Image (tube, rainbow, N blue to C red):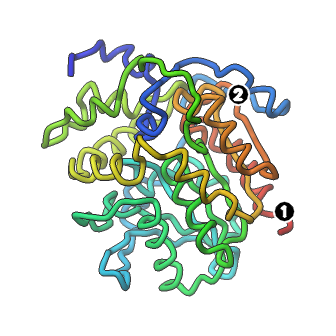
Amino acid sequence: MKKPNTQNQGRRYRRLSGLCLLLGGSLLCGSLLGASTMDSSARAAPAAEPPHLDIDLDAFDASKKLMVLPDGESLAYIDRGERSGSAVVLIHGYTDNARDWVPMLPYLSKHDRLILVDIRGHGRSSKPECCYTRLDFAYDIKLLLDALGVQKADIVGHSLGSIIAQTFAEYWPERTAHVVLISSTGGSPPDRPKKPPQFDFAAEIRKLKEPLDADSPFMIAWWDSPTPVDPDFIRRQRKDAAGIPLRVWLAVLDQALPANNVYGDLQSTLPRLKAPTLLIWGSKDPIMEEDVRQTLRSGLPNAGVKIFNGLGHNPFWEDPRGVAETINAFLKSPL
C-alpha cells in the first residue's frame, strides 16, 4: 500500500470496517444527505475533547472469562451488572472485541445484566480455520446464552455485530426481547449506481502481510474517528486487531460479508425479525450511506430510527452518554 500522509489520513477515510466490502467498496466521507431528516431531535456533535473513560481498561480486560461451547469453540465474554436484571448482549464489529463497549458502559442501565462477547476469531475467543458466516457467529451467541442460563435477552450489535444481532433475532425469536442495530444495513441495492471507491479498504486488507503492524498507516486510518476518542483506548484496539490472524480477517470478508450476495442474503431473512427494533446511525458515517440505510428501514418498517448528527461509524465512542441514554429508553419500552 502506498504510504499516505498519516497526519490527515484518518480524517480523510474515517474509521472504517469490513462493511466497506459489503457496500461494494464505495466510501463517501462527509455528511450524508437526508440523514438528519430521519430524526429532528438528533443530538449535536460532542465537544472537541474525547469523552473521558470511567473504566480501568486493565481491570476490564482482566475480567474476561472463557466459555467452551458444545460445538468445541471457546468464547471469551464479560458478564457484569445485576444478575437478576434484564440480560443485554452486546456484540462488537469486525476486527473489534468486547472492549468496544467500554466508552458507553458507565451510562448503560445499572439494573441490567450486561453480557459482552468477543465473537469467534476476535479478542480472546478461539480462532478456528472455519467457519465465519453470520449464522456461525449468531449460533455461538445462542450457545453462550444456553450455557449462562439466559432464556431471553436484548441484543445490541454494531456494524458486523449488528448483522449478527439481526441474524440471532431472526433464527431465535423466542430468545429475543429487543434489538438495537448500530451502524447497520440491509445491503447495497442492486440498482445502486456503480462508482469507484475513494479508498478501497477491502482491497488493502487483501494486500496485508503478517505480522500485522498495529501502528501502520493502514491501521491508523482503520481505527480513526471523525471526532476525538480516548487515545489509549484506540491504541489497545489497534493492538488487538493486529493480533487477529490475517486468515480470520479474510475469512470474515469472504464468508460473513460476501460482496456478491449480501443484499439478497440479508433481505431474505429480514421478515423474520419480529422483535421491537431500534436503528442507530451517525450522520457522518462514511460507510452507511443513505441508500443502504434505506434498505434496512424498508425491510423493518416498524423499527425506530435515531440519527446522531455529526458522528461517524462508531457513535457510541463519540457520544457514549447520548447513545446509551437512547438505548436505555428503548430497552425499557414495552414488548
User: Which residue is pictured at 68% across the width and 43% down the height?
Assistant: 280
Q: Nearer the viewer, residue 237 or 295?
A: 295
User: Which residue is pictured at 36% across the width and 44% down the height?
Assistant: 237
User: Which residue is pictured at 36% across the width and 54% down the height?
Assistant: 255
Residue 223 image position (x, y, % from top left): 39, 34
Mark 1: few/some/many CA within 10 Å (<14, 14-19, 20+)? few
Q: Which residue is mark 1?
A: 333
Q: CA distance from mark 2 to mark 1?
A: 24 Å
View extreme (front): residue: 191
Identify the element where label 2 is drawn. Answer: loop
Vertical comparison of 195 with 326: above or below: above
How many labels sit on residues?
A: 2
Residue 252 image position (x, y, % from top left): 34, 51
Image quadrant of residue 314?
Answer: top right
> Could you tell me which quadrant the C terminus lies in?
bottom right
Q: Nearer the viewer, residue 195 or 35?
A: 195
Residue 135 left/right relative to 155: left
Task: Tell me, yes or no, whether the two marked residues, 2 and 1, touch with CB atoms within 8 Å.
Answer: no
Q: Amino acid at mark 1?
A: Ser
Image quadrant of residue 175?
Answer: bottom right
